[in-house]
């Protein structure tokens, strides 16, 4: 495998990152049992660990003594599978807290338990007194004012992955969020349901983030005025929701929140809320098998700024279904239990200082933030396109750009001036010099960021609309490709090849001769010839002007799947089910080179722009064939299923490919490293192409859509709809201003910029 010059630096950087990561986390005494779905709350110098999946015992971990001590166990009838434990502090007795536990599956008895907890770390005399007390340090059913057990939820409700918190003006309202998209309000003083509402979201929630905005954010002009509104935040995969509850009027108000691209596919993460900040640790993307991803990433979300940040540093190991809890002094975050990326249950207990995650962003983190702003604009623009149904006002791009520019300017000014205000008074003699130098650097940074955004957002973003529609006489159309001068389209749907004049919008030639289905066709660089291949095991060359067959090339002994001219038009490369790739001389029709001994049928071949390399797709492998040395220089492995097609980027540095698994992947052509994975199509993908600038990819699918993707950001930019059946083929004009698509609906369509 070839390597690039910067690979050693990347490896060194990765090694340094691992060292820094390890230094940020302190390993503490392990849990008594390796489990996941642990629940834990902090209480003074203790962490109260309250059960897990397969573990009903509850323990107290003493932070100073670094020891565990058993408290009690859950009742035998209680099943723990994604339960939730929260605490309610008694203002009149700081030595006592109340713990609540909720859980249970659909159509089975759910548990709603309570425990009055007093520390078990006192002397032996106090410990014996606690043991004699009937209702301390043990789980019992929640009872109402008539001493009857409370049952939360309906039979059909599913409390697996439930999340709850306590709010309200008197710290008396229990908010419960659970699958599929429900929120309940329960009064802990009256033991009555107050409200049940369905969350206004498209996706389902479980094992999600649900936090209460802290008192610092809810401060009122008069300190003695109690808040009648509870403000909460919920995140789960691509769902983000700000939830305000007005307890006077018993009304919910909801507002959607944006989720960064690196978080929107994950849940089952650990999280803690520290004043305005939510920290997220790890998570799982919900997939099983090859597409499973267990994350080691750490993210930060500012509730007040509605701003995301992904840390350069990570967890020591990928983790999901662990629990994070904040120490009562807000100094440390403890992370306990969970599963790793091999689904091994863990007994790990680590802690990290909160201050380590509140520092200024690194350069990589700042770059990540800027790129996420671009992705945010792309998402907003996509929503605007859907809302306007194609009647999109392109001025919105400039409006969004100006919004981002102003927001970044304001944020940077505030951030930098806050830092200046923190300068010690001992620097006052040099204050003017410091200010002058600081402002100079500050404006250089501003100019750099604005130029970066101007280049990436204004120049890269291109949105398309339907221009023309051509009906194919023979019905379903499988191939549609431009000539290099963009004046013609070559298409095929059966045993024939048809040439269309784009300007006239009509068919000008029908090329007949193949006796089997035509699988591929392409114009020569000068647009004078067309090359085609078929299931009849032949390659044929055609004169565009006369429509006459010039040459039949034979040699393959199986269906020929793809064919392409070299950039100089002198050669043709072909692939076939006979497990070979062959290079032919156009003028003589003779075979020049043959690559064989492959393990499977070859589904596709493409030249690089310089004509020196050929990328081939077969089985689960992408191969690169150096035509000059006649050697296979690289193999890219990693697709879960059979690869259908692959293509070099215009500069030859990247390769895009797709498989029957509905996944598009982008690779570093030299190192074979996967750089991005694009998911969005909901059915089999048929074709993918780079735009001439290499910054955009376009794909088509059985889901009847054409999708545009930003290569650098790895996000979907636009979805083009209109075809009524599967979209089988597409191409992009050499100027990047026209897309052509063909479909089983019997039409060829062209799409142009808005």
Image: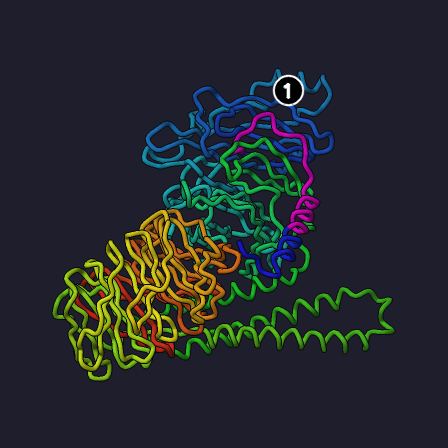
Q: Secondary structure at mark 1?
A: helix
Point 36% across, 47% down: residue = 599
Magenta-span inclusion, residue 63: no
Which residue occupies the extreme left position in the image?
Answer: 473
Residue 173 visible in the current orientation = no
**Direction from residue 529 to residue 332 in the image, left or right:** right
Residue that carries the numbered disc 1 in the rendered image:
130
Out of 657 and 454, give the one closest to the viewer: 657
Colour convention of the picture = rainbow
Which image quarter: residue 104? top left
The magenta segment is: 15-38
Out of 140 and 754, give the one closest to the viewer: 754
Residue 578 visible in the current orientation = yes
Point 24% across, 56% down: residue = 559
Check the image and report above or below for 457 versus 337. Answer: below
Out of 483 and 376, give the one closest to the viewer: 483
Point 24% across, 71% down: residue = 541
Rendering coords of residue 439 (x, y %): 72, 76
Magenta-span inclusion, residue 32: yes
Which image quarter: residue 8? bottom right
């Amino acid at each position: 495998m070839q390597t690039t010059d910067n690979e050693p630096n990347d490896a060194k950087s990765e090694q340094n990152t691992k060292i820094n990561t390890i230094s940020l986390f302190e390993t503490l005494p392990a849990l008594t049992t390796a489990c996941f779905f642990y629940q834990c709350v902090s209480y003074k110098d203790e962490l109260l660990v309250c059960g897990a999946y397969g573990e009903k015992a509850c323990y107290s971990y003493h932070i100073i003594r670094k020891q565990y001590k058993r408290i009690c166990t859950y009742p035998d009838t209680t099943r723990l599978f994604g339960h939730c434990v929260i605490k309610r502090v008694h203002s009149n007795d700081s030595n006592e807290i109340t713990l609540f536990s909720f859980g249970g599956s659909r159509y089975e008895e759910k548990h709603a338990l309570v425990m009055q907890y007093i520390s078990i770390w006192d002397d032996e005399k106090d410990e014996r007194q606690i043991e004699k007390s009937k209702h301390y340090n043990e789980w019992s059913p929640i009872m109402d004012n008539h001493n009857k057990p409370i049952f939360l939820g309906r039979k059909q409700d599913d409390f697996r992955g439930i999340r709850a918190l306590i709010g309200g003006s008197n710290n008396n309202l229990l908010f419960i969020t659970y699958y599929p998209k429900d929120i309940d309000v329960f009064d802990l003083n009256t033991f009555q349901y107050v409200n049940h509402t369905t969350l206004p979201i498209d996706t389902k929630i479980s094992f999600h983030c649900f936090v209460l905005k802290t008192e610092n954010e809810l401060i009122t002009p008069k300190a003695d005025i109690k808040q009648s509104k509870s403000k909460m935040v919920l995140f789960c995969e691509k769902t983000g929701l700000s939830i305000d509850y007005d307890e006077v009027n018993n009304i919910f108000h909801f507002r959607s929140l944006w989720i960064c691209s690196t978080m929107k596919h994950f849940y089952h993460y650990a999280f803690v809320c520290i004043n305005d900040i939510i920290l997220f640790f790890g998570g799982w993307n919900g997939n099983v098998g090859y597409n499973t991803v267990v994350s080691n990433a750490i993210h930060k979300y500012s509730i007040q700024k509605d701003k995301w940040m992904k840390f350069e540093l990570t967890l020591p190991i990928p983790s999901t279904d662990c629990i994070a809890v904040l120490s009562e002094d807000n100094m440390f975050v403890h992370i306990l239990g969970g599963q790793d990326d091999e689904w091994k249950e863990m007994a790990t207990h680590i802690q990290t200082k909160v201050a380590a995650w509140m520092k200024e962003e690194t350069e990589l983190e700042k770059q990540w933030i800027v790129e996420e702003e671009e992705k945010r604009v792309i998402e907003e623009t996509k929503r605007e396109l859907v809302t306007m149904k194609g009647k999109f006002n392109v001025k919105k791009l400039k409006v969004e750009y100006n919004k981002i520019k102003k927001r970044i300017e304001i944020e940077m000014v505030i951030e930098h001036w806050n830092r200046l205000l923190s300068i010690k008074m001992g620097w006052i003699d040099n204050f003017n010099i410091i200010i002058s130098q600081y402002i100079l650097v500050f404006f250089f940074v501003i100019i750099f960021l604005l130029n970066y955004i101007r280049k990436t957002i204004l120049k890269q973003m291109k949105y398309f609309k339907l221009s023309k529609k051509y009906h194919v006489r023979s019905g379903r159309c499988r191939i549609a490709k431009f000539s290099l001068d963009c004046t013609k389209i070559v298409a095929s749907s059966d045993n024939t090849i048809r040439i269309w004049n784009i300007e006239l919008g009509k068919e000008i030639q029908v090329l007949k001769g193949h006796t089997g289905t035509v699988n591929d066709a392409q114009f020569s660089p000068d647009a004078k010839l067309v090359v085609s291949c078929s299931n009849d095991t032949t390659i044929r060359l055609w004169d565009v002007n006369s429509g006459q067959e010039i040459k039949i090339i034979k040699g393959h002994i199986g269906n020929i799947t793809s064919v392409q001219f070299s950039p100089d038009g002198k050669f043709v490369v072909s692939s076939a089910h006979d497990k070979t790739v062959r290079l032919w001389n156009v003028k003589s029709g003779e075979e020049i080179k043959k690559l064989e001994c492959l393990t499977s049928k070859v589904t596709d071949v493409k030249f690089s722009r310089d004509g020196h390399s050929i990328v081939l797709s077969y089985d689960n492998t992408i191969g690169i064939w150096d035509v000059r040395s006649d050697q296979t220089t690289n193999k890219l492995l990693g697709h879960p299923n059979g690869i259908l097609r692959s293509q070099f980027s215009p500069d030859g540095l990247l390769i895009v490919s797709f498989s029957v698994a509905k996944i598009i992947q982008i690779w570093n052509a030299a190192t074979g490293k996967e750089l991005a994975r694009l998911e969005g199509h909901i059915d089999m993908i048929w074709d993918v192409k780079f735009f001439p600038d290499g910054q955009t990819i376009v794909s088509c699918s059985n889901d009847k859509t054409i999708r545009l993707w930003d290569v650098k950001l790895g996000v979907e930019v636009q979805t083009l709809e209109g075809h009524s059946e599967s979209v089988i083929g597409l191409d992009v004009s050499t100027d990047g201003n026209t897309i052509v698509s063909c479909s089983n609906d019997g039409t060829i369509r062209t799409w142009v910029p808005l």
